[in-house]
Amino acid sequence: SDQMLLSLKTKNAVEQALQSLAEGEKVVLTVANTMGSFIADYADKAGVNPGDPMPLRFNDVLQNYLEKTRWVTIKQPFQKGPGQRKYLTDAMIGDRNAQRFNHIKKMIAGLDLDDMPASPIDYMRWELQEAGYKVAEITGRDHTIDYCSPTKGPVYRMRTGKEKGKKALTQNLQAFNRASGKDGGLDVMILNQSGSTGLSLHASKTFKDQRRRHMIIVQAEKNIDTFM
């Protein structure tokens, strides 16, 4: 449900961001989930390597969560450690539940969800860059989908240390507070919890670029303490 709601709001968030940018504001987009682990898991199962096409659809996201219902973790009383992962076969869940599972699987495959991006962060970044704005993100994720390739379509990519390390965080922070994209700075910042704590992106008098900021909460954290 969380991922579906985030995906459904993505295009509207881009529209709001473009409106704010057109009005001379700088934009901060926030999410709770980056989909990094899902992209990594999908790439591993599908044998996709960095640089390969990755036409991931939201149908695949739903199928992944459906498959997770067939996996359980078995632990003994007072057992320490991760426990034993086990897949529930058709024989284990019974004919009736197996039929239900396959029915849902076929239903998901037949849904028209092409308007819902599987990786909202990457989709928002691509749309805003296509509109001519400079965008960066401060998150801890490693795995991304590059929507920018005109020939290959969506491409699987891994972020380098230069993109997500402490040095990159400082550079992105300074670029956002220093100037606009036309002047070598940044117009839009995408954040999640892991990257945002302790940062200041307000229109402070101590920053060179004092234009008003507009924070668009695309996906809020469930925990109000984390959100604040």
Image: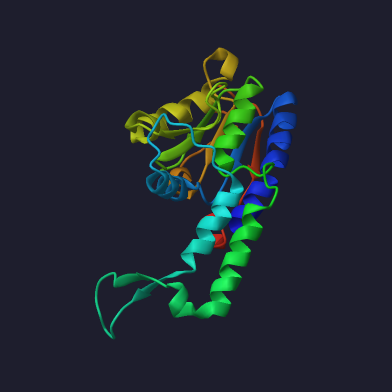
Horizontally, residue 191 falls left or right of residue 15, namely left
Residue 16 image offset from top left, x and y in percent: 73, 36
Q: Is residue 196 visible?
A: yes
* Frontmost residue, 96 versus 10: 96
Residue 9 image offset from top left, x and y in percent: 69, 46
Please identify the quarter of the rendering in which residue 220 is found: bottom right
Q: Tell me the quadrant of the picture where the N terminus can be found.
A: bottom right
Going by the picture, which residue comes out furthest to the top? Answer: 183
Residue 224 image offset from top left, x and y in percent: 57, 61
* Frontmost residue, 147 versus 114: 114
Residue 196 image offset from top left, x and y in percent: 48, 44
Q: How many marks?
A: 0
Q: Tell me the quadrant of the picture where the C terminus can be found.
A: bottom right
* Frontmost residue, 157 versus 217: 157
Residue visible at 42% across and 73% down in the picture: 88
Q: What scheme was used to colour the molecule?
A: rainbow
Please identify the quarter of the rendering in which residue 101 is found: bottom right
Going by the picture, which residue comes out furthest to the bottom? Answer: 77
Please identify the quarter of the rendering in which residue 205 is found: top right
Up-down: is 132 above or below 194? above
Horizontally, residue 147 falls left or right of residue 39, namely right
Residue visible at 52% across and 41% down in the picture: 191
Up-down: is 152 above or below 90? above
Q: Is residue 1 visible?
A: no
Up-down: is 184 above or below 51? above
Residue visible at 62% across and 53% down in the picture: 109
